[in-house]
Image (tube, rainbow, N blue to C red):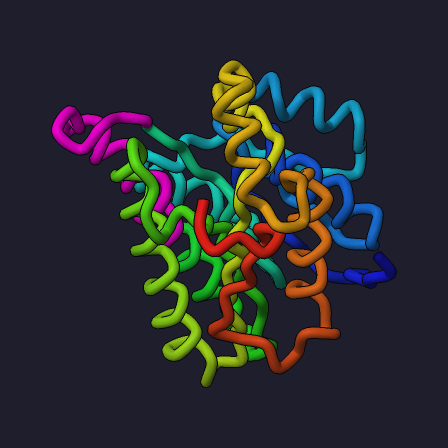
Amino acid sequence: MDVSLSGKRVLVTGAGRGIGRALAIRAAACGAHVIAVSRTQQHLDTLKAECPSVETVACDLGDWEATRKALEPLEPVDCLVNNAGIVKHAPFMEITESQIDQTFGVNLKAVINVSQVVGRGMAERGKGGVIVNVSSILSTMVKGTAVYCASKAALDHLSRVMALELGPKGIRVNTVNPGVVRTDMTERMWQDPERAAALQKAVPLGRFAETEDVVNPILFLLSDSSSLVSGASLLIHGGSAST
């Protein structure tokens, strides 16, 4: 995909593995100065070894004040991708308070925190910016992941509100909503071949997404080629009605 991010500073959370890591590498290849944020220093070290131009920041996004202290000195940022996320599998009647706090703490609260820090800088510079929030098609309904689904549904609506409020400041906000993507987060699924086969059969295009299937649309949304796209949710699920 021929996308130019030359001269742009792009901050990616959850950049140590999976979609975030692939995005950091591709964005750098597109000319961006990439700031990769992850909780795990080891993942950042291997990313740095693979892509030396990437600037790395180790930070636990679940800690509100620590996140602000880590990110505020990184300004200016032109593009933000809120990719960090966690999933807790549990039937509704077995959900614990800890699972709720952890999931919403990263999947929603951290997005608000990081976007406030970065968005404030975008607004003050008067040049606008782009925010892409990585959601999921599980923002609809899936048995056994109620808290995750709820957190992503909240993220979808939050993103639409952000687009409305930040648009007059020249800041575009969109979400990408992938279906099943082959990453570390979904590794558990591959341990159940029957379930994986059933889910894949339900995808009209006949395959699950690879990381590049999600990275390419994000790069488009970050680029000037999507300059009038804001408040949108881009479904990346191979035509599935649901997952």
Magenta stretch: dominant SS? helix
- Using the image as rendered, state which of residue 199 and residue 178 is in the foreground: 199
Span highlighted in magenta in the image: 89-112
- Using the image as rendered, state which of residue 83 and residue 115 is in the foreground: 83
Q: Where is residue 194 in the image (x, y as percent from the top left)?
A: 51, 21
- x 50%, y 65%: residue: 233
Q: Where is residue 86 in the image (x, y as percent from the top left)?
A: 40, 33
- x 33%, y 54%: residue: 153
Please check the rendered image and state whether residue 121 is part of the magenta-colored stretch, yes or no: no
Q: In which quarter of the image is the N terminus?
A: bottom right
Residue 60 appears in which quarter of the rendering?
top left
Please check the rendered image and state whether residue 111 is part of the magenta-colored stretch, yes or no: yes
- Using the image as rendered, state which of residue 37 and residue 219 is in the foreground: 219
Q: Position of residue 127 (x, y in %)?
A: 60, 77
Q: Quadrant of the C terminus?
A: top left
- x 36%, y 49%: residue: 152
Judged left or right of residue 205, residue 82 is left
Q: Where is residue 67 in the image (x, y as percent from the top left)?
A: 40, 40
Position above or below: 172 against 98: below
Judged left or right of residue 58, residue 69 is left
| Residue closest to the far bottom | 168
**Does residue 234 appear in the picture of this structure?**
yes
